[in-house]
Image: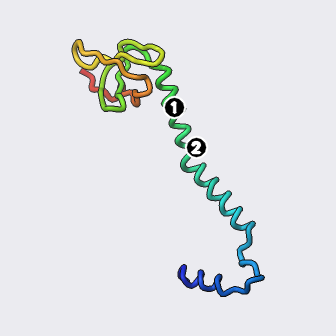
């Protein structure tokens, strides 16, 4: 059956008769849909946000990091809301702590 057939059957039902599904099954379906969405979308995202906050709070001098803009550098100084990263030679950039997204200390090539 397609959508058009279902719509026509519901429209041709007698006016005093309630549809076969009822309201309870709709509510149960919506609750199940929300529970599945929470399990597969909201919960993992919150877990990832907590891990990122923990990473940012545990930053220390010498950590190799990547910013949201793709700038690679080494942490040189940490303040409450900002971090000074050494990019290359004497070049240092002050970035917001929230823009640091990844630690690449382990991924960095060993020279």
Q: How is the image coloured?
A: rainbow
Question: Looking at the rendering, in which quadrant would you find the C terminus?
Answer: top left
Residue 74 relative to residue 57: left or right: left
Task: Classify mark 1: residues with Cα within 10 Å, few (<14), some (14-19) or many (20+).
Answer: few
Residue 67 lies, in percent from the top left, at: 35, 28
Mark 1 or mark 2: name the one nearer the start of the chain.
2
Contact between labelled residues 2 and 1, with CB atoms less than 8 Å apart: no
CA gap between label 1 and label 2 equals 13 Å
Q: Which numbered disc covers residue 73?
A: none
Q: Which mark is residue 43?
A: 2
Say what secondary structure mark 2 lies in: helix
Considering only vertical position in the picture, is 3 above or below 23?
below
Residue ranking furthest to the right: 16
User: Residue beneath label 1, please?
Assistant: 51
On the rendered structure, is 5 left or right of 56? right
Q: Is residue 83 left or right of residue 87?
A: right
The image shows residue 105 at horizontal and vertical percentages of: 36, 24
Taking the spot 35% from the left edge, 18% from the top edge, the residue there is 94
Estimate the x, y position of residue 9 in percent, counting from the top left.
63, 85
Which one is in front, 90 or 64? 90
The answer to which quarter of the image holds residue 23 is: bottom right
Q: Which of 9/87 is in front?
A: 9
Residue displayed at 52% across by 26% down: 54
Q: Residue furthest left?
A: 89
Which quadrant does the N terminus fall into?
bottom right
Element at badge 1? helix
Specify the farthest residue to the front: 15
| Mark 2 neighbour density, 10 Å: few (under 14) some (14–19) many (20 or more) | few
Identity of the residue drawn at 71% across and 67% down: 25
Q: Residue at x 55, y 37 (%)?
A: 47
């Amino acid at each position: 059956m397609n959508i058009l057939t279902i719509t026509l059957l519901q429209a041709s039902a007698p006016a005093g008769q309630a549809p076969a599904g009822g309201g309870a099954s709709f509510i149960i379906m919506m609750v199940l849909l929300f529970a599945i969405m929470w399990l597969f979308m909201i919960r993992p995202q919150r877990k990832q946000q907590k891990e990122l906050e923990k990473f940012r709070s545990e930053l220390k001098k010498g950590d190799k990091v990547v910013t949201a803009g793709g700038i690679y550098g080494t942490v040189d100084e940490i303040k409450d809301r900002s971090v000074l990263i050494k990019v290359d030679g004497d070049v240092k950039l002050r970035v917001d702590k929230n823009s640091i997204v990844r630690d690449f200390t382990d991924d960095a090539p060993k020279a």
